[in-house]
Image (tube, rainbow, N blue to C red):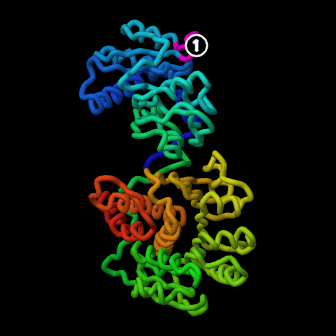
Amino acid sequence: MRHFHTADEVRAAEAPLLARLPEYAAMRRAAHGLATVVARELRVRTGGVVGRRVLVLAGSGDNGGDALFAGAELRGRGVAVEALLLRPDRAHPAALAAFRAAAGRVVTRAGDPDLVIDGIVGLSARGSLRPDAAAIVDGLTAPVVAADLPSGVDPDTGAVDGPAVRAAVTVAFGAYKPVHVLASARCGELHLIDIGLDPDAATITSPDDGEVGRAWPVPGPADDKYSQGVTGIMAGSEKYPGAGVLCTGAAVAATSGMVRYVGHGGAEVVHHYPEVVTARSFDEAGRVQAWVVGPGFGTDDDAADRLRSVLESDVPVLVDADGLTVLSQRPELLRGRSSATVLTPHAGEFERLTGSAPGPDRVRSVRALAADWNVTVLLKGRATVIADPDGTVSVDDAGSSWSSTAGSGDVLSGMIGALLAAGVPARTAAVMGARAHSRAAALAATDRGRRTAAPISASPLLRAVPDAVGDLRARA
């Protein structure tokens, strides 16, 4: 599991480290790791190191010092290194002296390097790049290796509100920061350099595939369809039958022991999944261990009555899509619930629930909704943010945007519902479902051997769910 530490948490951990180490020792450790990654990138991208050209973009902070120390080390490896100082009068003096002593050249123009090291700003910076730095970055054609984080991207939120670096590789120093998972598309390939930092426990985490695979519920020798979990699905309508099919199919594919469907689309659901048991109403459904309610089932008074019936039950409930719209108009339906409730909004649904968009600090917004409503919240996105009422947050980085397609959320809801029915705790189920969903989207886009990934719809994503779960379990 990866742990992500805010800028304040990192600075608090740095203080005792810097106090006990010789001056610049931590910076040189970071610079050595950065130089090693840059040399590796040069070999991969150009076939060699000696004689290759690297440009250091050095700002006035410690990141500029890290980059200049790395440039000095690269000079010792035979790389032609030039440094463009964004604030020459405020460049890190010791790092600049080491760079000059290694015969590094200070230049006033970017030139045509093979690789660029971004050391413009670091953890203390907020906001986009200044105009002079933005103009330089905009003119770059070489791939960028970011020192700790891409400049112009907020370290704690991953927000970009103007010009910013888009790195091919980011070298994190001492600890991962939230930017590395919330803005992974800006960070590129990620490397962590150990500099001796020992931060306190983080409240933002991200599971790895092996952890999800190990935790995925599979039947044992003593299990039957009931002990494996019975998932109730209340989704779809005569107008939107596909939502019921996708949501129900996902619960089946995610290894629910049994799935009960309630709604008007029973015939269509059984046509696709004959193993599903159907009913027309909540009262006829029979016992389930968890409910998924909302995708495509309407927003009228009848839908509100059905949602109320589900929320009055004593089992975990996931509310999605139309169910969230109903809930935004009738939040009192959640009052008095003792069992777990999971809400899975996209940004528009989140705004309907709260009255405001998630904004640039998605983690803070999701935490606030989870705490205010005493529910687990999953805010969808390339970086999906999941929070419990106690403020604990997990983020799933999908690594792509292939799941951005109609019906994809219905599949995700069914997957998480199956996990809830199997007894997996709410936030864990949401995290596991999101990870498997991301993996299924990637598999569907590449179609197990397609040379170039291609856009997909929800149907091939759903078909890829069993393979995605198998892949996760194989990594356990």
Q: Which amino acid does label 1 sit on?
A: Arg
User: 216 or 461: nearer the eye?
Assistant: 461
* Residue 23 in sight in this render: no
Q: Choose top left, top right, bottom left or bottom right for residue 34.
A: top left
Give the mark count: 1
SS state under label 1: helix
The answer to whether residue 85 shows anywhere in this view is yes
Q: Is residue 108 above or below residue 399?
A: above
Q: Which residue lies furthest to the bottom in this view?
A: 284
Residue with the mark numbered 1: 90
The region drawn magenta spans: 86-92
Give 363 or 316, whichever is nearer the viewer.
363
Apparent side of residue 218 relative to residue 95 in the rendered image (left or right)? left
Quadrant of the frame with the C terminus = bottom left
**Residue 35 percent location from the top left of the image:** 36, 24
- Crowd band around label 1 with a 10 angstrom C-alpha radius: few (<14), some (14–19), many (20+): few
Residue 87 shown in magenta: yes
Picture coordinates of residue 425 (x, y %)?
51, 66
- Residue 196 counted in the magenta span: no
Left or right: where 176 falls relative to 305: left
For the point 74% across and 72% down, which residue is it?
Answer: 330
* Residue depicted at x 39% and y 11%: 104
Residue, x 35% and y 27% (percent of image)? 38
* Residue 329 in the image, given as x and y percentages of width and height: 75, 70
Q: Position of residue 204 (x, y in %)?
A: 54, 48
Residue located 46% across and 27% down the image? 140
